[in-house]
Image: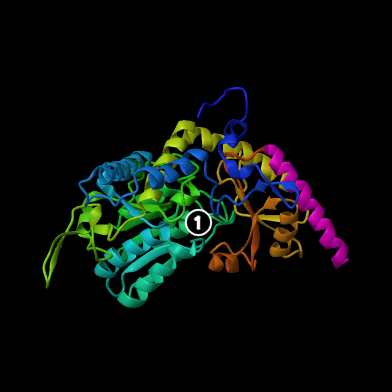
Amino acid sequence: MTLATDKPLALKVRQDFPILHQSIHDHPLVYLDNAATSQKPQAVIDTLRDYYERYNSNVHRGVHTLSGLATDAYEGAREKLAKFVNAASHQEIVYTRNASEAINLVAYSWGLNTLQPGDEIVLSVMEHHSNLIPWQFVAQRTGAILKFVELDATESFDLNHYESLVGDRTKLVSIAHVSNTLGCENPVAAIVAIARKFGAKVLIDACQSAPHMPLDVQAMDCDWLVASGHKMCGPTGIGFLYGKLDLLRSMPPFLGGGEMIADVFLDHATYADLPHKFEAGTPAIGEAIALGAAVDYLNAIGMDTIHAYEADLTAYLFARLGEIPEVRVYGPQPDSQGRGRAALASFTAGEVHPHDLSTILDQAGIAIRAGHHCTQPLHRQIKAQSTARASLYFYNTREEIDTFIAALKDAIAFFGSIFG
């Protein structure tokens, strides 16, 4: 990929995404559902196809040529992910099917074997269900207590409330880096520093940050971090868990089977070293290799470049949404440069149901999300049964935002004429 210097980022890269060049209901596709899943560049699609066409084979256990090629590519992708988040070692990267599985791995392997009755787990009211339900399971089985950080006046993470919740009984803090509904970027450095005062472990859900900004797990000093490949230009069915090496070594296996063993006897087994201890069975080989290609693609653009471009889009999106009196956007406002929040807007439009808005916009070729976005407790907090959500990525343009705003205004006017 060669990036020209005389065009906005999106116009340099859009040709790399074949799915974007189509019509929906006789309108050019405007894809604004990137927080749910991103689109895939041709380089990622080609990498996945190349694996199946040229060197499809199981990894690690074979000594023939195809197995060697597959193993090298599979482990090479792990090295790319380690560098992408600045892990100290590739052994700190565990492949999972998605971020949900990564959180469940920590919950079942560490949580069930560590937490005792009365121990406290601190979450926030904005957490995705994937970072809530596993800890509900753990609390029910161990007697641990769940505590929740509330929102502040800007509908962001209330750091003062968080500090009041953390104490000697706190064993785990598990927080989203960026809210998939509110768009707020949570203060990870302060969250970790406060947890460390009491020896608590910290897990960061980076699903909405890994695709959009540089990550440095060593600077964060988090104990675990999870992400999903499909939100960062990679395939579905692949994600990863970062964990500190000594901590991962202390955790028992999550699943049993092939690949995760050293020696097996009829009545007991010994386990492989990291990361394979947590990777039972045949993995998603092609998907992992293609995720490595996605990391290459993002790195070629530069995560700082992506973050800066999306900030500009965010400022423009919020300015245009501000033209519509009926629209109420949830979460903090960006600053004048579009910084301080993610490039997404969850909103309501008066009495118009978000599902109706999404349906009408789809007829104009515009894809947005509508619903509770897997944050039902948060929607109760903000007193909205559901919201519509437009979420941007680096291949979106200001012109697409204009198309969205025009269609949104038409949809609101249409429903206004019905409601009278």
Q: Tell me the residue at 50%/51% (across/down).
A: 178
Task: Give residue 396's position: percent from left, percent from top.
Answer: 62, 40
Quarter residue 347 falls in: bottom right
In the foreground, 231 or 135: 231
Display colour scheme: rainbow
In the rendered structure, the answer to whether residue 378 lies left or right of residue 140 reads right
Q: As shown in the figure, which amino acid type bears the numbered disc 1?
A: Asp
In the foreground, 284 or 138: 284
Residue under label 1, please give it.
158
- In terms of secondary structure, where does tag 1 sit? loop
Task: Give residue 104's position: percent from left, percent from top.
Answer: 36, 64
Task: Give residue 369's position: percent from left, percent from top.
Answer: 63, 57
In the foreground, 237 or 60: 60
**What stretch of residues is rendered in magenta?**
398-420
Up-down: is 69 above or below 101?
above
Task: Give residue 410's position: percent from left, percent from top.
Answer: 81, 53
Q: Tell me the residue at 46%/47% (across/down).
A: 234
